[in-house]
Every structure is written in structure tokens, then in C-alpha cells.
Image (cartoon, grey):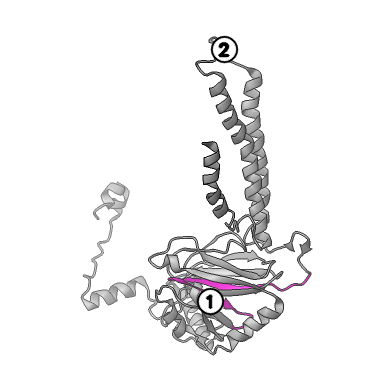
Amino acid sequence: MSRYRAIALLPVMAALSGCNLVVLNPAGDVASQQGDLVVISTLLMLLIIVPVMALTVLFAWRYRQSNNTARYEPDWDHSTQLELVIWAAPLLIIICLGAITWVTTHKLDPYRPLDRIASDKPLPAGAKPLEVQVVALDWKWLFVYPEYGIASVNEMAAPVDRQIRFSLTASSVMNAFYVPALAGMIYTMPGMETKLHAVINEPGTYKGFSSNYSGAGFSHMRFNFLGLSNQDFDGWVSKVKSSGGSLDRNAYLTLEKPSEAVPVQHYGTVDPKLFNAVVNLCVRPGTMCMSDMAAIDRAGGLNAGGKAAADAILRANTLAGFPDTQPTGLCTVAEAVDAAANSGAVQRPTVTPISASAVQAGPQRLANP
């Protein structure tokens, strides 16, 4: 029967031999280091798992009921040597895992710029990284190349052996950017900007996708990542530039609408301030940017300083060509109450002065002044 079982397993083994374990055999140096970490951690844990599984089978066989030659010691209760093995071995493994985790957590921090492009290739001095701005839309990926003034949807390209510096955000819900051959997964969130540094070392076409469920079109949120030579990358940039499409704010608002299985799209020109507007949630005309709100709050909110900051922001946005992105409704609390009372929306509150005796009586008298 064992012979027949082995024959029956041959098709399964043949099918598994065609699997591409991209996480353990990636084409990028960062992903390669992460894959090595997975292998090292697994081997360290197997140092305990394999002996325990083997001893479980050994003990079950040796001390089976029919084995009358096995030692029977009903009064045994302690062994110092056994206790040392049981506790020392896991402790040493935990120490090793902790040390490795500490080092690699800092070395492979996605915000940390690379110091090498491969295990035998240090980062060239003065090498300029490729800037890529990524926006997770519903349900597609937008890639903006500010250095070249171009953008693409559901397709990304990068030259081999050049550091890539990603700036990532999302339009509506939290998502996750993941190219297994390039680097680890990193989240994208609306109103926030995350960073990722990576490099691709081998030419090819690699799969990228969202690894965090984000709604109905999640399964179609995939794209091709193209690892190209410098010459081929220049050709790809020229092809995108010649596409003729323009990604301004109005085009982005159209693209932002939820859609599924979106084909590759190219834009030959891009609004240089689009990504900053996406991060600050102020692409739509008449919407104040979150950075402007923070500036007004830092200047004093609804006080005089905040109004002065608002006026300065209005002038700056007008000079920058975005007159619609301006604060239009700043007012004080008293002005808001008066406006609401005059419109009849609310009744003007009546304030009753608190006497000195009520103040001296304590909080219980102030509950209903």
C-alpha cells in the first residue's frame, strides 16, 4: 500500500514544483532580506518543534502498554537536568529571535533610506532615488512620478538597481500596498502619508496588489510592476508622456469615483500639487486643506491670530492659482450663536449671573444656576 500511496502523491508533488515562492525568492534586495528573516526565524523555531514532535512519537512508542521492558517509575517527580533542557533551550531561542528582530526592525524600517541596492552593491554616493507617489483609490492604484510629470493607473515601472522612495496615501479607506518581489506590505490611509524605500534588482514583470480588504472591488485591485533597464525605463517614460492625457484636479475627481477592473491608463502631464492635495483631503474645490486647518489652530483657532493665519492662507492659495481652496466660514462662537438665533434655528440662550454665595456653596449649587 505504501508504494501505491507514493505513486498517488506524485501528481501533487509535480503540481507543487511549479509554485513560485516569490516571498522566499524575490527580485528586490529589501524583500530578499525579509525572506531571509522568515527562513532564519522558522529554523530557530524548528529547533524546538522538531525534537518535541520526534520525542512525542518516541515516548508513545516506547511506553506503550504492550512494552513490558520499559522502565516504570511511579514515584519520579523531578530531574534538574531535564528542567535545564526544557527551560534553557526555548530561552536561548527567544533571545536569538529577539536580537534578530531588534536589528532587522531598524535595518528594514520602511521609512529608512537604503544603504545598499544589493548584498554586494553599496548605494552609489549621490545617487538620486526615484520618487513615486502612490494613491490607493476605489478600486485601483494611481502612481505619480513628480520628477517626470507623468502618472499611470494600475501600472508601475522602475529601473533596476535604483532606489525607489514611495510616498503613499489613500483616497477613502485604509488599504495596503504590496509587491512581494519588491518589499514588504505597507498600509495607506486617507489624510496620512506613509513612506517606503525599496529597490528591484532583476528585470521582469511582477505582481502588485492590495493586501487589505477595502470593499466590493478589492479582488480587482491589482497592477503590474515593471522592472526595466535604464534604457527601457526611459522608453516607458516617453511612451507615457506621449499618451496626451492630463491629470488635473477635475480629472482626478473623476478617476477617484469607485470602479472595478480598470485597465491601464497613462497621463502625460500631472498637476504638481495634486498629491499634496490628496493627502490633505482638499482636491475638491472649496475644501480647506488639513494642513491649513492645523496652521489656523496653531495660530489660535477662532481668535485674532487664527483669523490672521486664515487671511494669509487665502492670499497664498490665490497667488498659487487655487482661489477655491480657502477658508470661507470662520467665525467666533458668539457670532455663530447670533447667526443661528437670528435665523430661528435655535433659541438664543439666556445666561443667568451666578451670585457669590452660590459660588461659595460649592459645585452642587452650580449644577442648576
Residues 234 and 255: in front is 234
Asked if the residue under mark 1 is in contact with the one under mark 2, i.e. CB atoms within 8 Å, the reply is: no
Dot 2 or dot 1, earlier in sequence: 2
Location of residue 239 with respect to 55 vertically, above or below: below
Q: Callout 2, which amino acid?
A: Trp
The residue where tag 2 is placed is: 76
Q: Tell me where residue 121 appears, x and y as whole percent.
A: 77, 63
The residue where tag 1 is placed is: 275
Location of residue 350 with respect to 4 vertically, above or below: below
- The residue depicted at 64 percent of the width and 65 percent of the height is 197
Residues 219 and 355: in front is 219
Location of residue 314 with respect to 205 vertically, above or below: below
Classify the position of the C terminus by image quarter: bottom left
Query: Mark 2, residues whose alpha carbon is within 10 Å: few (<14), some, or many (≥20)?
Result: few
Position of 117 with respect to 148 (left or right) is right
- The residue depicted at 59 percent of the width and 30 percent of the height is 54
- Bounds of the magenta span? 125-149
Verify whether residue 236 appears in magenta.
no
- The residue depicted at 54 percent of the width and 15 percent of the height is 67
- The residue depicted at 56 percent of the width and 77 percent of the height is 144
Q: Callout 1, which amino acid?
A: Phe
Disc 1 element: helix
